[in-house]
Image (cartoon, rainbow, N blue to C red):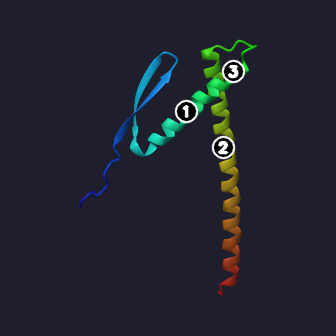
């Protein structure tokens, strides 16, 4: 039996944080997520640094605060996904009951 599954090739994504660069090897179909995520993250870092001018946030503090914001956003999205899945399960169960009631035994 032939395996027609062709693995997804990896591509390189370069990420620069502070004065260090990282060359990541990521699946080609996920490259856009890494690039968009990096751009969004660095924009959040820039915004936090600008907000904190009076507070004196340095690069590391801005990166740490942006990281926490990202983790909180992921947690909010996870909770919302779980809520939506629960609602979907409830609707499927109600639909299943209605269909079962409508089918003669």
Per the image, the residue denoted by label 2 is 77
- Give the residue at x 31% y 54%: 5
* Label 3 CA crowd tier, 10 Å (few <14, some 14–19, many 20+): some
Q: Is residue 30 above or below residue 84?
A: above
Quick one: which residue is furthest to the bottom in this view? 104
Element type where label 3 sits in the image: helix
**For this rendering, which residue is in front, 71 or 39?**
39
Residue 56 figure quarter: top right
Q: CA distance from mark 1 to mark 3?
A: 17 Å
- 26 relative position to 46: left or right: left
Between tags 1 and 2, which lies in front?
1
Q: Earlier in the sequence, mark 1 or mark 3?
A: 1
Q: Quadrant of residue 91?
A: bottom right
Which mark lies nearer to you, 3 or 2?
Answer: 3
Residue 54 higher or lower than 1, as above or below: above
Q: Is residue 69 left or right of residue 36?
A: right
**Which type of secondary structure does the marked residue at label 2 adopt?**
helix
**Res 50 label:** 3
Q: Quadrant of residue 53?
A: top right
Residue 50 in percent (x, y) is at 69, 21
Using the numbered discs, state the Cα–Cα distance from disc 3 to disc 2 in whole angstroms.
26 Å
Residue at 68% across, 67% down: 93
| Mark 2: few/some/many CA within 10 Å (<14, 14-19, 20+) | few
Mark drawn on residue 61: none
* Disc 1 target residue: 39
């Amino acid at each position: 039996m032939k395996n027609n599954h062709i693995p997804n090739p990896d591509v390189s994504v370069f990420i620069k944080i502070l004065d260090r660069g990282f060359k990541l090897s990521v699946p080609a179909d996920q490259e856009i997520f890494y690039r968009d995520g990096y751009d969004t993250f660095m924009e959040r870092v820039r915004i936090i640094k600008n907000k904190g001018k009076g507070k004196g946030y340095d690069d590391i503090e801005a990166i740490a605060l942006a990281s926490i914001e990202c983790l909180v956003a992921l947690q909010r999205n996870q909770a919302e996904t779980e809520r939506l899945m629960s609602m979907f399960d409830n609707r499927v169960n109600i639909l299943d009951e209605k269909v079962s009631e409508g089918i003669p035994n």
